[in-house]
Image (tube, helix red, strand yellow):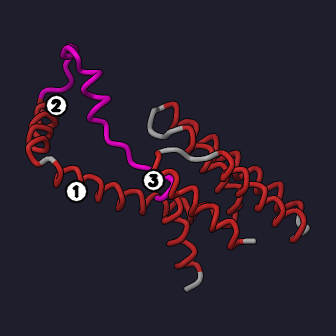
Amino acid sequence: MGLLVWIVLFAVAVSDAREHRIPNKGLLAILLLSLIDKALLLSNFSLLFWSVATGLACFICALVLYFLKVMAAGDVKLLGVVGFWLGPAHIYQAVFWIAISSVVVGLFYVLLRVAQAPDNTKSMLSKYSLLAMYGASDTKPVGSKEIAERERYRMPFAPVVVLGIAVYFYFLNQ
């Protein structure tokens, strides 16, 4: 059952990396496979209850990050499903490794952006140094919203989640 969950997780990660979209069918498949594993195969209903509680806790924490505009809606659902799948025994260490992998992958995205446009990097550094020295300005330049939407750089989060969980299970089995 675990192998099927990993296959669907991999498909969800590839979909997010290619299209910046996490398919609900994949998340429902992971949820269904986890439910079958926990309810029918293990016959442990207290584990099922705590897995639901863990999934809801992960969903609510990610929902707060969604309202702060840090995460997308698909990422929120993914973390809820992952919380249900892993359960209370594994979620803390998995979240730690997801955080570590997001920092590493994020640094690679920064290096990619610097390599693609070194001139923009110099202007960005000067802008942030001015912001650090003098603080934020109350005035906004004309057309800044269109520029911000075009220059926004998005990092797909599902591959980071899958990478973090894989690293966690690697170190768990050592």
SS class, disc 2? helix
**Mark 1 or mark 3: which comes first in sequence?**
3
Image location (x, y in percent) of residue 17: 45, 53
Q: Is residue 169 magenta?
A: no
At x 24%, y 55%, the residue is: 112
Image location (x, y in percent) of residue 70: 44, 38
- The residue nearer to you, when weighing 25 against 51, is 25
Q: Quadrant of the N terminus?
A: bottom right
Q: Residues within 10 Å of mark 3 (few under 14, many from 20)?
A: some
Q: Residues within 10 Å of mark 1 (few under 14, many from 20)?
A: few
Dot 2 and dot 3 residues touching (CB under 8 Å): no
Q: Is residue 138 magenta?
A: yes
Q: Which residue is mark 2?
A: 131
Q: Amino acid at mark 2?
A: Leu
Q: Amino acid at mark 3?
A: Ala
- The residue nearer to you, when weighing 11 against 73, is 11
Q: Which residue is mark 1?
A: 111
Q: Nearer the viewer, mark 2 or mark 3?
A: 3
Question: What is the span of residues highlighted in magenta in the rendered image?
Answer: 134-159
At x 84%, y 62%, the residue is: 36
The reply, left or right, for residue 174 in relation to residue 38 is left
Vertical order, 133 against 154 (above or below): above
**Mark 2 or mark 1: which comes first in sequence?**
1
- The residue nearer to you, when weighing 62 against 145, is 145
Image location (x, y in percent) of residue 153: 32, 42
SS class, disc 3? helix
Q: Amino acid at mark 1?
A: Leu
Q: Which residue is mark 3?
A: 17
